[in-house]
Amino acid sequence: MAENENPAEDKAIPPQDLVPWSEFLEDYPLNSVQNVSEYYEKTHSQYGDPFRRLTPTLRLHCSKCKGVRNFSGRWTHHDTFSNGDVVHDFVKYTCKDCEDASKTFCVISQAIGDNGNGCALKIGEFPELHLELPRSVEKLLGDDYKLFVKGLTCEKRGLGIGAFTYYRRVVEAQKNHLIAEILRVAEKLGGPADIRDKLKAAQKEKQFSRAVDAVKGVIPESLLVDSHNPLKLLHNALSICVHAEPDEQCLRIAHSIRLVLVDLSERLKLALGEQDELRTAVSDLLNFTAEAKKKAKD
């Protein structure tokens, strides 16, 4: 972010390279540099600075309310700025429900182009990033869940190489178990025998790359992540030489590995029908109906 950049200058940023400003603040870890959309608006004022940095409502974890709540924000300094300004500032968010819990971000940001886009670097966050993990992740990873949490801690603190290293250890250790769970789904769906045979053969492969090749085209559709083979996505990420990439790039890769693993764990849970809460709810409804009928007879 050069000091003499002009936000009015038209710079086309591919849509796929943009994330909403709110999402950047909510989900991205420290040391993340990202092109963001909906970062600023024109003030349409004849006086003063012509642009205003936005503070969209965020969905954050509230330590007082013990859950995710809406937070409203305000900039510590003036929210308006002029052409080319690189802004170093704090933005403080407060829970709309309890009006007590707060969250403060320290960011360096700058407008880019004339469409409300910007570029931001998150250099501080207090309390630290709160990331909820579904219970399905712990069940899927078993003994390696502790390593996964260590990777998550590194990711929240912006330690890209550390996060990547922990996540890679988890995926490599869990390779056979992941394939075994995929095989369980294939067996439940009653797919062709040759598909199940390929999955069984993949479990015997010591090399991740060969295992991925063995399951090419046989992953049940319900387990595909955005139409892609999740094992292939993970293998591609793990194939990157961590020491050849800057830490911020390792952080982005680690972030992607975590998202794919979490998504896969949820898809496996749904596909295998292991929804304990839903089963409990169904059981409660059936018991309630039976009791109601019994009382009606009495």
Image (tube, rainbow, N blue to C red):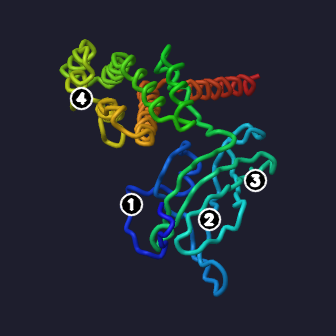
Which element is circle 1 on?
helix
Q: In this rendering, would 63 be left or right of 10?
A: right
Location of mark 4 (residue): 218
- In the rendered view, tell whether residue 199 sits above or below residue 51: above
Pointer 1 or 3: first along the chain: 1
Dot in front, 4 or 1: 1
Q: CA distance from mark 3 to mark 4?
A: 48 Å
Q: Which residue is mark 3?
A: 96
Label annotation for residue 54: 2
Badge 2 density bin: few <14, some 14–19, many ≥20, Cα 10 Å: some
Q: Is residue 210 left or right of residue 130?
A: left
Looking at the rendered structure, which numbered label has been put on residue 232?
Answer: none
The three-letter code of the residue at mark 1 reads Pro
Report if the CB atoms under discs 4 and 1 are less than 8 Å apart: no
Q: Which of disc 1 and disc 4 is earlier in sequence?
A: 1
The picture places residue 36, in percent across and down from the top left corner, at 49, 58
Alpha carbon separation for disc pair 1 and 2: 19 Å
Amino acid type for the residue under numbered disc 4 = Val
